[in-house]
Amino acid sequence: MAYVYDLDSELPDVFVDNFGTSVVEFALGYDLEQEDVILFSVTLGPSIDGASDLRFGIRRRHIEKEWKVTGLDFSREGVLECIPAYAREEVRILLLECVARLVQACTDEKITMETYYRNLPPAALAKYEMITNVLIENGFLIETKFQDLEGISYWLYTRG
């Protein structure tokens, strides 16, 4: 991949896609050989029974055909490939700002979140705690937080 890291730290407004998912995303860089922009996407929804699902990951969008976009890549490999170590803190700050924008625009009473990987160490769970703090700052409380038998961590937040 001829990927070039070129962070665009100016965040757009929340937009709602054709599936009813609220999205805030920013460019991490581009791959001219593949004609792709590499995005960090933070999504909320769509609502199921009054609860939206919060997710974040990396995806590719065609440079000219903005409708041509991949699904979210939650993998550690995607992060290592697209976000240099020196840029991780800056990307984390942008992630938290995206979460704040989505939560402020959310009309649901509940938000769910879960980890992609099992049995994450405390250092890897730190970003989820930061996200929790953003949700709390924006009027949500933790209703439930647990790890299932397979090691996936789950959160359920309720508007307080």
Image (cartoon, grey):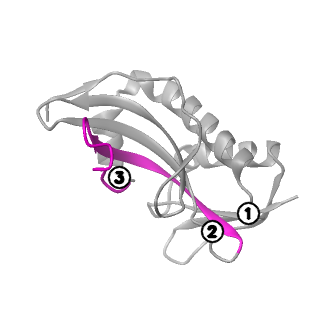
Q: Does residue 118 show up magenta in the picture?
A: no
Q: Does residue 53 show up magenta in the picture?
A: yes
Give amino acid for label 3.
Ser
In terms of sequence position, does the residue under pointer 2 or pointer 3 come before the other? 2
Circle count:
3
Q: CA distance from mark 2 to mark 3?
A: 24 Å
- Most foreground residue, 101 or 146: 101
Disc 3 + disc 1, Cβ < 8 Å: no
Mark on residue 79?
none
> Residue 54: x and y, percent?
58, 57
In terms of sequence position, does the residue under pointer 1 or pointer 2 come before the other? 2
Q: Is residue 108 above or below residue 94?
A: below
Q: Is residue 116 above or below residue 2?
A: below
Q: Residue at x 88, y 58 (%)?
A: 160
Reading the image, the residue beneath label 3 is: 75
Q: Secondary structure at mark 2?
A: loop
Q: Which residues are magenta?
A: 50-72
Work out whether residue 132 can be spotted: no
Mark on residue 108?
1
